[in-house]
């Protein structure tokens, strides 16, 4: 199926160059339509989408239940200020709380960075009540990604992304990922919280090793620091459980999420145990659009579908299938991840960015999560036939890469 282009690719690129800030190094394609795991570009070409907007459209593009909910809500009530109640926000909070084991409260944001921003403010406020004004340091890990606002950038363990924007807000400490002893060494009385991804997403799809979260939980309990888990990329079924930390027995104090919560409608959330959440008082934190009716309605529709389809179990099964298929491919030396957040490490000398460029030309959307690894994060409703099709495209590209020595 093709679409009639309204604007040609060249026109889109020219307009973009003239009017949009040049903060993105974009691939040479403009998508104009999607359906499930398929995308179409401005020239009518079809693609298999194995990135899903980086783990955002977990139910695929244009899911009818989400589309119907959005259109109904758009005709009912798009927005009211958080100066007033709306009927959808508390229902959504209750649903998320149940998925996290109950006993918590939720603040709604518009993005992952803002969900983490809320978590960091909450941790500082909570720290003040425990140890006074000096207790504001947050420990995070090298290779982590928590967002691009100045504060979440300060928590992001990628010094090269931080350099240009110094000075960043103070109060952040970085330790090696997966090293519980290094983390313990950083936990003094000035630390109010530890912020961790259960699988580092942007850092290369690095799962926390068995026992790591448990050890961090016990250090946090010992030193009275909050354990805050960033589930922005891993949350809501992606890793084969509702939340990535649920592969362990650990109960965090704070959990943040965004990406797939609205299946493409911008919404994020910061959940905290009720006792912790109580540290933020009226007037301490706010955002105009957070939890507004349109976004909350989208998220409720997403959760309805996810529960009806048992999305975590589907992601676990499909992830296993994808992983098995990738393991046998030429030039793939390692496959890692959880559920449908998967990376394939390529043989030395194979450039992951070049592989993704060729895949795009052949109709497969992927990304190079590191210079040597490909990331796969398709819709959690992806079919077995679509996995086979994507792997077949990739196999040819990797075979050619070997022959060309790229
Ligand atoms: C783990 C994690 N945290 C936070 C963020 C930031 O989210 P956003 O881009 O919505 O601000 C991301 C984005 O990739 C992420 O993967």
Image (cartoon, helix red, strand yellow):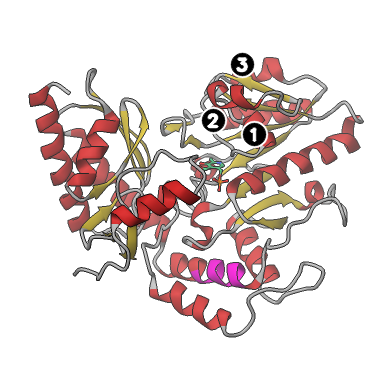
Tell me the distance, in whole angstroms, between the alpha carbons under discs 2 and 3. Answer: 18 Å
Q: Position of residue 100 (x, y in %)?
A: 61, 54
Q: Residue at x 84, y 51 (%)?
A: 278
Q: Quadrant of ligand 1?
A: top right
Q: Are marks 1 and 3 in contact (CB under 8 Å)?
A: no
Q: Residue at x 71, y 49 (%)?
A: 272
Tell me the distance, in whole angstroms, between the alpha carbons under discs 2 and 1. Answer: 9 Å
Of labels 2 and 3, the one closer to you = 2
Q: Which residue is mark 2?
A: 144
Q: Is residue 358 above or below residue 166?
A: below
Q: Which residues are magenta?
A: 294-301
Quarter location, residue 194: top right
Q: Position of residue 209 (x, y in %)?
A: 47, 28
Label 1 or label 3, whichever comes before in sequence order: 3
Magenta-drawn stretch contains 377:
no
Q: Of residues 327 and 9, which is closer to you in this image?
A: 9
Of labels 1 and 3, the one closer to you = 1
Q: Are marks 2 and 3 in contact (CB under 8 Å)?
A: no
Name the outermost residue toward the left: 403
Q: Which residue is mark 3?
A: 181
Label 2 or label 1, whichever comes before in sequence order: 2
Q: Which residue is mark 1?
A: 195
Quarter location, residue 337: top left
Q: Position of residue 371 (x, y in %)?
A: 34, 26
Q: Are marks 2 and 1 in contact (CB under 8 Å)?
A: yes
Q: Residue at x 78, y 56 (%)?
A: 286
313 displayed left or right of 192: left
């Amino acid at each position: 199926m093709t679409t009639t282009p309204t604007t040609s690719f060249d026109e889109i690129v020219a307009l973009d160059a003239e009017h949009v800030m040049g903060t993105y190094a974009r691939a040479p394609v403009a998508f104009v339509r999607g359906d499930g795991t398929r995308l179409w570009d401005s020239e009518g070409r079809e693609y298999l989408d194995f990135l899903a907007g980086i783990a955002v459209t977990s139910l695929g593009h244009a899911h009818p239940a989400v589309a119907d909910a959005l259109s109904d809500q758009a005709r009912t009530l798009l927005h009211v200020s958080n100066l007033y109640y709306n009927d959808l926000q508390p229902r959504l909070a209750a649903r998320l709380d149940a998925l996290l084991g109950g006993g918590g409260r939720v603040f709604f944001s518009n993005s992952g960075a803002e969900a983490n921003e809320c978590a960091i403010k909450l941790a500082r406020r909570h720290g003040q009540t425990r140890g006074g004004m000096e207790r504001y340091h947050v420990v995070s890990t090298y290779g982590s990604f928590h967002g691009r606002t100045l504060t979440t950038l300060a928590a992001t363990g990628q010094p090269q992304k931080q350099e240009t924007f110094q000075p960043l807000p103070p109060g952040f400490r970085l330790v090696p990922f997966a090293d519980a002893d290094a983390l313990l060494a950083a936990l003094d009385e000035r630390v109010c919280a530890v912020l961790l991804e259960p699988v580092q997403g942007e850092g290369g799809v690095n799962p926390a090793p068995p026992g790591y979260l448990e050890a961090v939980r016990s250090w946090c309990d010992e030193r009275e620091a909050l354990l805050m888990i960033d589930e922005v990329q891993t949350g809501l079924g992606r890793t084969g459980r509702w939340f990535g930390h649920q592969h362990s027995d650990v109960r965090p104090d704070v959990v943040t999420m965004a990406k797939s919560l609205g299946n493409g409608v911008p919404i994020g959330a910061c959940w905290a145990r009720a006792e912790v959440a109580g540290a933020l008082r009226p007037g301490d934190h706010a955002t105009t659009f957070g939890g507004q009716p349109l976004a909350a309605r989208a998220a409720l529709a997403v959760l309805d579908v996810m529960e009806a389809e048992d999305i975590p179990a589907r992601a676990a099964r499909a992830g296993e299938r994808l992983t098995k298929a990738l393991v046998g491919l030429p030039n793939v030396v390692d496959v890692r991840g959880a559920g449908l957040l998967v990376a394939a490490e390529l043989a030395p000398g194979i450039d992951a960015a070049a592989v993704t460029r060729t895949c795009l030309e052949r109709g497969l959307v992927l990304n190079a999560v590191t210079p040597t690894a490909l990331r796969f994060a398709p819709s959690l409703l992806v079919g077995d036939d679509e996995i086979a099709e994507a792997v077949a495209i990739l196999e040819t590209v990797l075979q050619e890469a070997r022959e060309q020595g790229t």
